[in-house]
């Protein structure tokens, strides 16, 4: 069945079926033989991180606003019987795979405008001006690291650090927004320019002209240097050869990746987005849409199984949405823009984000995979790096999840609310991330730092929330 | 050694043995004294000696054999209650055998890896290192030493200068995990694919900058031509080598990179692209990643090769600074002056004497040795610290510990002893380099500022001062005109002062001047207001409305409460847990850093948890470790670490335990050292540090750590002469760290290269 649907799809591919998206071709075929159908396909993870908080009530179906968990257990309600709030309209067609998750706290993180790495790494940062160093790999990269791909985890960003300089232009090139880390002390680089990201991800297969030239030159340079290292290796005593071998191996791995990309040329060419002027646009909305286009193609071609997108920061002005008068920071502080109240502005921004999220989900759903679609093996997470509000107190940290999550979580199709901070059964984002990691086969006992206040109140938080794991 | 070995074996085993034999049998000693407890039947501690192979030299069980050697030699094994004890002769013989075999094992790859772990350093016999019996001449193995993050940071700064936005984009490829102890070791740091990924990404950004902004002449001239000449190409290659590899290219390199650039220009049919590819390539050459210390100089009659003049120039420069050799050092290298030990010494003395040359590596050694700089890494519950933003407090405390180290380095008398025992500290001060007279003037200026504002609406000041207001303030006192820009008066600073100064004047005390604390090396955080200052004062048990800040520092804080760095809040916090003190880590620290001892890691079968009980002090709760199988190791740590129980986990002195309300018992003991006057009971940490400060073993242990830091490896027995000379230089110099350093950096261990075991 699996094979046949793929064959069908490959056929479509070879026929060059225009707008239809492609099958994920870089699959872990070996896993299919293992028996557990859940392991048959790589799992994909997309984290969408907005700034200025995610208001819990704004992502709660009206009928559920007054409902609270009782008896120390999470409140769990199926979403199918409830209409989503207006700003979530775009997600209606995906309600069966939507999860709304509320009530986890994150008070061990820096409170205020941003928690920096804490939002996905569960630890504090020095202060608003300094993210400090990441203490561990953040949950996004840790999840995707179990599903190797040519590019590993990809970071795309419209904006950099939450708190930038007033009126800073949209950044270009590689930036470090202080959000994701691949290991302790090693921040994940984010690409801010969609055209450069396009070049880096798809360039090897597609580029022509200047880009091709530069790419080929770099390949030549890597070969030249490999030769240089080999020459030096002859002069180095045996005990130290290992160090040069490691370095040489790094060059070979890089060349290997380039070759692998070259062998994926057809797939990449067919799956790569069309490079339009939008990629080089200076308009925020064009760029963000380009990032989503890149993310979808990246996942579908299998160039990467994990993407984190930094959606905006406090300096950003959503002119494309008709909010040209105020930036996200001012709106977060209650200032209206272009005749709309601050709350309405927040609704507009959120609706826009969720539209982009739905667009990504639709693309993934259009790709058959096994008995279902690629969306079944994907988890898209939407959150804010400031928790529940513009100045997050982090007593709760809401999340939306979208996708089938490989059948590993009980979130799809449900509204889940944890008991409030300080009540029995309450959990922290550390518990939530531990649940995700455990569900996806990472045996970690507990992810992140503890909340001492909860410890003091006799509510220790260690380990996963069992009811979230399927 | 071999004959002794055969002698031992022949008593029990008839099987022939030889060089190539598969299995080496254990001496009967183990059968007689060990196997009863460490045999097949419930082996104690999980150690089975009946199954162990005597092939120690293969390094298979190196750690276990090291532990056996250690426990036999200090009399911990066989235990006191054993049925029989070996006689001294038996013990000595078997120790000699194990020791000899361990020594052979040193040349194995596995052990050379272990030698790259500083925690393993103390396995080398302390007594032997210092008693002068070792005749082998010192050397270091030839090696590649990966670049360290500090050197790369400086290179970045040199390239990007004031363009800090672009500079921030260039990430650190040579990160070193900030673990405890000395860790920039040549053996274990590798450049791998993650390093290359970062380097390549950086190379693109750097070249973009080099060819886009402030383009140097050597590159510009190339960009302006379509057919570059050999001279133009060579000039560009030279500049990039000097910038990134810190030296001119050798002839063959120049040729290769010249050819490569021309080829790349041809392939790209574009001068800029070809040049860019070549500039990037130079950033990735092995020497931009590894410092080469192969020993390219002449060979002596003992088979040791000297570092070449070039190698020595780099080794000396990077030993003291984060910068490549300066002009004078290169000149000395070219003229062959570095060909003698005296010539090397001369350059070291010159660099040490020149205050214009920043030598951050020295302070970094003290940070790594004492470990106090890790205080900000310990995640603390700010609520227990009056709910204050905790991050800035440890950063300030570390800074003040740094000031103390720098002060004693400047004095350069009994440096270690002073750092362990001094009752004088820096608090709210700028260090002993600052002239007290100038501080008095600044205080006078503050008084004028206060008097000027006290009846004016200072609370309404905006952060940015109105130019007219600024002019008025600057007219108050010359000090306000001469301050560096970042410390100039702002509305915020005035408001902070105006809350704090009245408290001081009402109480008749001298105020502290604003402190600007570095947070994470990014921005400075102003610690000016009475509110802010109160919090780091608290760690010293000082009060904001009573602390009369001396202009001359270090000053005597409270000799009944504190002495030396080990009772400095920064050290205490760095060696504490999130919510508790940490007698184990502190005891282990003293045992390993100061007493040259070794404590094995917690066995994996042990789930070490201190029982919770709010009615007991931590010491009482630690009684769980008194069980025999725990105590064997814990006795090496607890009695030392418990002496610091007189301080809470924020470094505050205390006499009662806040949770249980019970009085603190901070007594302890020193034992198992070969220095008799060091051993015995101590009433508190204050008594402990006095004893440690005057000890020979402690001094020698310190010398060993300095050796590890500057050689980038653990010591071998063959380094004995280097260590003895360094120790002697320190003592003869009246406790001069400078003398110690010069001795180490002009030693055979620093200058000669030879492969281990050859």
Image: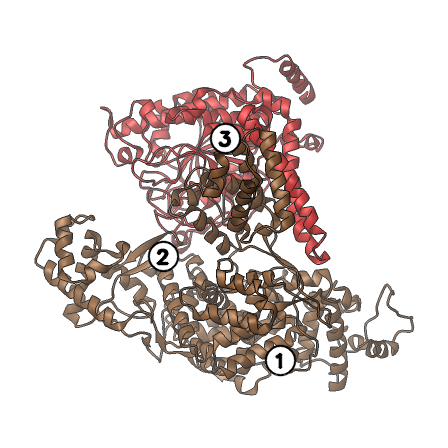
Q: What residue does disc 1 label?
A: B130
Q: Residues within 10 Å of mark 2 (few under 14, many from 20)?
A: some
Q: Residues within 10 Å of mark 1 (few under 14, many from 20)?
A: many
Residue B494 % position (x, y): 18, 56
Chain at numbered mark 3: A
Q: Secondary structure at mark 2?
A: strand
Quarter that holds the C terminus of chain B = bottom right
Determine whether B313 is above or below B80 in the image.
Answer: above
User: Based on the displayed image, in which of its 4 quarters is residue A151 positioned?
Assistant: top right
Count the numbered circles shown. 3
Quarter that holds the N terminus of chain B = bottom right
Checking the image for residue A300, the label placed there is none
Q: Secondary structure at mark 1?
A: helix
Checking the image for residue A197, the label placed there is 3
Which of these two is toward me, B593 or B28?
A: B593
Are discs 2 and 3 located on one and the same chain? no
Residue A327 % position (x, y): 29, 32
Q: What residue does disc 2 label?
A: B518
Residue B654 % position (x, y): 36, 73
Query: Does B577 sit left or right of B720 as displayed?
Result: left
Which of these two is toward me, B455 or B355?
A: B355
Determine whether B404 is above or below B157 in the image.
Answer: below
Q: Secondary structure at mark 3?
A: helix
Is any atom of residue B657 visible in this view?
A: yes
Do labels 1 and 2 touch, CB within 8 Å?
A: no
Letter of the chain in brown:
B
Q: Colour of chain A?
A: red
Q: Residue furthest bottom?
A: B677
Rendered residue at 70%/33% (across/down): A34
Q: Residue furthest left?
A: B455
Chain at numbered mark 1: B
CA gap, disc 3 and disc 1: 60 Å
């Amino acid at each position: 069945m699996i094979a046949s649907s793929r064959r069908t799809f490959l056929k479509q591919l070879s026929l060059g079926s225009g707008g239809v998206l492609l099958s994920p071709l870089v699959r872990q075929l070996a896993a299919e033989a293992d028996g557990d159908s859940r392991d048959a396909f790589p799992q994909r993870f997309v984290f969408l991180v907005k700034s200025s908080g995610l208001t819990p009530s704004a992502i709660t179906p009206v009928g559920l606003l007054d409902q609270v968990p009782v008896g120390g257990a999470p409140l769990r309600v199926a979403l199918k019987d409830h209409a989503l709030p207006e700003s979530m309209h775009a997600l209606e067609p995906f309600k069966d795979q939507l999860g709304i998750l509320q009530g986890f706290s994150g008070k061990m993180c820096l409170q205020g405008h941003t928690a920096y790495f804490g939002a996905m790494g569960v630890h504090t940062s020095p202060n608003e001006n300094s993210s400090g160093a990441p203490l561990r790999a953040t949950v996004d990269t840790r999840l995707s690291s179990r599903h190797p791909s040519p590019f590993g985890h990809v970071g795309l960003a419209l904006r950099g650090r939450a708190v930038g300089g007033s009126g800073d232009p949209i950044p270009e090139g590689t930036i470090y927004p202080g959000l994701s880390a691949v290991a302790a002390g090693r921040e994940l680089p984010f690409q801010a320019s969609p055209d450069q990201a396009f070049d880096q991800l798809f360039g090897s297969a597609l580029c022509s002209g200047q880009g091709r030239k530069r790419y080929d030159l770099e390949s030549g340079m890597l070969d030249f240097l490999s030769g240089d290292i080999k020459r030096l290796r002859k002069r180095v005593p045996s005990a130290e050869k290992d160090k040069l071998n490691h370095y040489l191996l790094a060059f070979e791995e890089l060349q290997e990746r380039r070759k692998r990309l070259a062998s994926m040329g057809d797939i990449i060419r067919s799956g790569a987005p069309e490079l339009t002027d939008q990629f080089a646009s200076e308009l925020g909305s064009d760029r963000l849409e380009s990032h989503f286009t890149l993310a979808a193609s990246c996942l579908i071609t299998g160039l990467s199984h994990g993407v984190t997108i930094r959606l905006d920061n406090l300096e950003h002005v959503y002119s494309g949405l008709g909010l040209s008068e105020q930036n996200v920071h001012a709106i977060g502080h209650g200032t209206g823009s272009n005749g709309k109240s601050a709350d309405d502005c927040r609704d507009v921004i959120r609706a826009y984000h969720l539209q982009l999220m739905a667009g990504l989900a639709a693309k993934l759903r259009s790709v058959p995979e096994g008995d279902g679609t690629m969306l079944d093996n994907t988890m898209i997470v939407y959150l804010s790096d400031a928790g529940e509000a513009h100045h997050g107190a982090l007593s709760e940290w809401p999340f939306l999840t979208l996708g089938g999550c490989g059948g590993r979580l009980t979130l799809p199709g449900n509204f889940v609310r944890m008991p409030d901070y300080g009540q029995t059964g309450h959990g922290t984002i550390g518990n939530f991330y531990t649940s995700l990691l455990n569900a996806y086969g990472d045996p970690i006992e507990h992810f992140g730092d503890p909340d001492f206040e909860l410890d003091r109140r006799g509510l220790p938080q260690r380990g996963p929330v069992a009811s979230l794991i399927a | 050694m071999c004959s002794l070995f055969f002698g031992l074996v022949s008593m029990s085993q008839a099987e022939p043995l030889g060089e190539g034999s598969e299995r080496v049998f254990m001496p009967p000693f183990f059968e007689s004294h060990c196997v009863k407890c460490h045999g097949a039947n419930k082996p104690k501690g999980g150690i089975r000696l009946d199954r162990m192979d005597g092939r120690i030299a293969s390094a298979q069980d190196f750690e276990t054999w090291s532990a056996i050697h250690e426990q036999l030699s200090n009399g911990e094994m066989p235990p006191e209650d054993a049925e029989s004890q070996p006689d001294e002769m038996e013990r000595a013989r078997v120790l000699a055998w194990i020791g000899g075999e361990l020594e052979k094992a040193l040349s194995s790859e596995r052990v050379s890896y272990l030698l790259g772990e500083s925690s393993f350093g103390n396995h080398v016999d302390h007594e032997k290192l210092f008693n002068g019996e070792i005749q082998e001449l010192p050397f270091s193995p030839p090696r590649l030493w990966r670049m360290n993050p500090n050197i790369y940071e400086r290179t970045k700064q040199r390239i990007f200068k004031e363009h800090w936005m672009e500079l921030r984009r260039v990430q650190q490829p040579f990160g070193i995990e900030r673990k405890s102890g000395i860790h920039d070791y040549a053996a274990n740091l590798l450049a791998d694919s993650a390093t290359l990924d970062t380097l390549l990404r950086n190379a693109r950004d750097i070249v973009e900058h080099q060819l886009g902004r402030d383009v140097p002449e050597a590159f510009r001239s190339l960009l302006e031509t379509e057919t570059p000449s050999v001279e133009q190409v060579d000039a560009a290659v030279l500049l990039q080598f000097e910038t990134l590899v810190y030296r001119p290219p050798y002839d063959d390199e120049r040729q290769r990179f010249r050819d490569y650039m021309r080829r790349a220009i041809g392939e790209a049919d574009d001068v800029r692209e070809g040049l860019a590819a070549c500039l990037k390539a130079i950033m990735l050459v092995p020497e931009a990643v590894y410092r080469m210390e192969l020993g390219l100089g002449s060979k002596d009659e003992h088979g040791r090769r000297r570092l070449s003049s070039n190698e020595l120039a780099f080794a000396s420069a990077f030993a003291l600074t984060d910068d490549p050799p300066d002009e004078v050092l290169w000149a000395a290298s070219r003229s062959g002056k570095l060909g003698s030990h005296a010539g090397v010494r001369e350059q070291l003395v010159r660099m040490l004497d020149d205050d214009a040359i920043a030598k951050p590596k020295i302070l970094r050694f003290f940070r790594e040795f004492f470990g106090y700089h890790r205080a900000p890494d310990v995640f603390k519950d700010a609520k227990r610290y009056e709910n204050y933003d905790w991050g800035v407090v440890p950063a300030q405390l570390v800074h003040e510990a740094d000031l103390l180290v720098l002060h004693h380095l400047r004095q350069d008398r009994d440096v270690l002893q002073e750092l362990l025992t001094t009752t004088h500290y820096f608090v709210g001060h700028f260090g002993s380099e600052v002239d007290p007279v100038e501080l008095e003037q600044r205080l006078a200026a503050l008084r004028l500022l206060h008097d000027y504002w006290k009846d004016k609406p200072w609370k309404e000041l905006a952060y940015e001062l109105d130019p007219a207001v600024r002019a008025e303030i600057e007219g108050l006192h010359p000090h306000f005109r001469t301050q560096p820009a970042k410390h100039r008066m702002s509305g915020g600073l005035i408001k902070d002062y105006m809350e704090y100064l009245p408290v001081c004047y009402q109480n008749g005390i001298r105020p502290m001047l604003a402190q600007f604390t570095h947070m994470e090396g990014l921005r400075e955080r102003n610690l000016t207001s009475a509110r802010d200052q109160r919090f780091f004062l608290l760690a010293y048990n000082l009060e904001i409305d009573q602390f009369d800040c001396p202009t001359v520092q270090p000053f005597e804080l409270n000799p009944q409460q504190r002495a030396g760095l080990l009772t400095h809040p920064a050290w205490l916090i760095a060696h504490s847990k999130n919510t508790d003190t940490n007698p184990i880590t502190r005891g282990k620290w003293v045992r390993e850093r100061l007493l040259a001892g070794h404590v094995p890691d917690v066995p994996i079968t042990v789930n070490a948890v201190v029982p919770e009980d709010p009615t007991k002090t931590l010491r009482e709760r630690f009684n769980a470790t008194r069980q025999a199988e725990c105590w064997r190791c814990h006795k090496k740590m607890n009695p030392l670490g418990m002496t610091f129980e007189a301080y809470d986990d924020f470094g505050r002195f205390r006499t009662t335990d806040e949770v249980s309300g019970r009085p603190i018992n901070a007594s302890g003991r020193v034992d198992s050292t070969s220095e008799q006057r060091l051993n015995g009971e101590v009433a508190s940490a204050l008594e402990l540090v006095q004893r440690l400060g005057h000890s020979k073993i402690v001094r020698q242990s310190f010398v060993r750590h300095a050796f590890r830091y500057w050689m980038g490896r653990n010591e071998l027995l063959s380094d004995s002469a280097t260590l003895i000379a360094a120790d002697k230089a320190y003592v003869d110099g009246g406790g001069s760290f400078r003398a110690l350093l010069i001795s180490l950096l002009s030693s055979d261990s620093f200058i000669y290269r030879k492969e281990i075991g050859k």
